[in-house]
Image (cartoon, rainbow, N blue to C red):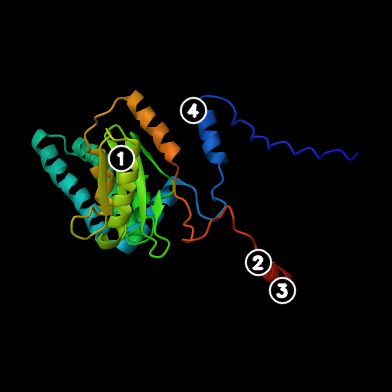
Amino acid sequence: MARRATPPPPPAAPAGTTGKGPLAAIRRRRARPKFGPDGRPTGRIAQMRQVYSMTRREDPSVRWWMLGVVVAVFAVAVPVGFLVGHPIYLTVIALPLAVLGAMVVLARKAEAAAYKQIEGRPGAAGAALRSIRRGWDITEEPVAVDPRTQDSVFRGVGRAGVVLVGDGPPHRVGKLLEAERRKVTRVLPSVPVHVLQAGTGEDQVPLAKLPRKVQRLKPVMTKNELSEVNRRLKAIGGMRLPVPKGIDPMRARPDRKAVRGR
C-alpha cells in the first residue's frame, strides 16, 4: 500500500523576525513581500497612490480639495505663529495637521468614487450595506432576486429590527420588497421591518448615504431578542431558485428518447 505524501513544512520566517520588540517589528515589516500575488505593490504609500489615482479618475477635483486643506491649515498656523512669537514652532505643528486633513479629504472622496463605480450594477446595495462595520448582520447573498431583470432584495438584522433594501428601479423592485416584507412579517409579527430602496430616483436612498441611513435607525430590541430574530430568519432560508409552474420536481422524469439521442 502506497504511503501518503507528507505535505512540505511551511517556510521558515527570516532570521530575526520572530522575536518581540520594536526591532523585530521593523525586521518583519522589511521582510514582507513588496508585491502581492496580482503584481501590485503592498506598501502603504503605494496603496495610497492607487487610491488617489482611482479617485482622481472619478473626481478630478480631489487634488484641489486636498491642496485647499493644506493651504488653509498653513494660512491659519503661520499668522498665529507670528502673533505669538513662534512661527517655526507653529509651522512644524501645522505640517502633520495639513497632511491629516488632506488624507481625510482623500478618504471621503475615495469612498464617494467607489460608490459611483458600482452605482447601477446588480448587487450594489448589498456592497454598500456590507460596509457597515458593526451592529448589523447583513446577508452575503440577496434573499430575493428577479431572474429576468436581476432586481434583488438584501436583508439586514440589527437591534432596530429587520431592514429590507431593494436594488433596482422602484416600479419593479417594489413587488419583490413587498413579498419579502410579508414573509418576514409572518414569522416576526412584532419586529419592525424597515423597507428601503437604493438608487438615485425619487424616494430612494443613494448608495453613499445608505449605510448611514441604516445605522441611524432607532434600536428597539435587546441582544437576546436579536439572537431569537436571527434564529427565526435562518429558519426561513434564503433565496430559492424558481420552478416553472405546472411541474412537480419530485415527480419529474428524464426524457428517455432525448437521453438516447433520438
Question: Which residue lies under the disc numbered 2?
Answer: 255
Q: Considering depth in this image, is 2 or 94 the residue closer to the camera?
A: 2
Question: Which residue lies under the disc numbered 1?
Answer: 185
Q: Which picture quadrant has residue 223?
A: top left
Q: Which class describes the residues within 10 Å of circle 3: few (<14), some (14-19), or many (20+)? A: few
In this rendering, the label closer to the viewer, 2 or 3: 2
Q: SS class of the residue under badge 2?
A: loop
In the image, farthest residue toward the bottom: 262
46 over 163 or under it: above or below: below
Question: Which residue lies under the disc numbered 3?
Answer: 261
Q: SS class of the residue under badge 3?
A: loop
**Image quarter hosting the N terminus:** top right
Q: Can residue 239 be seen in the rendering of this structure?
A: yes
Q: Amino acid at mark 2?
A: Asp
In this rendering, the label closer to the viewer, 4 or 2: 2
Name which of mark 1 and mark 2 comes first in the sequence.
1
Q: CA distance from mark 4 to mark 3?
A: 72 Å
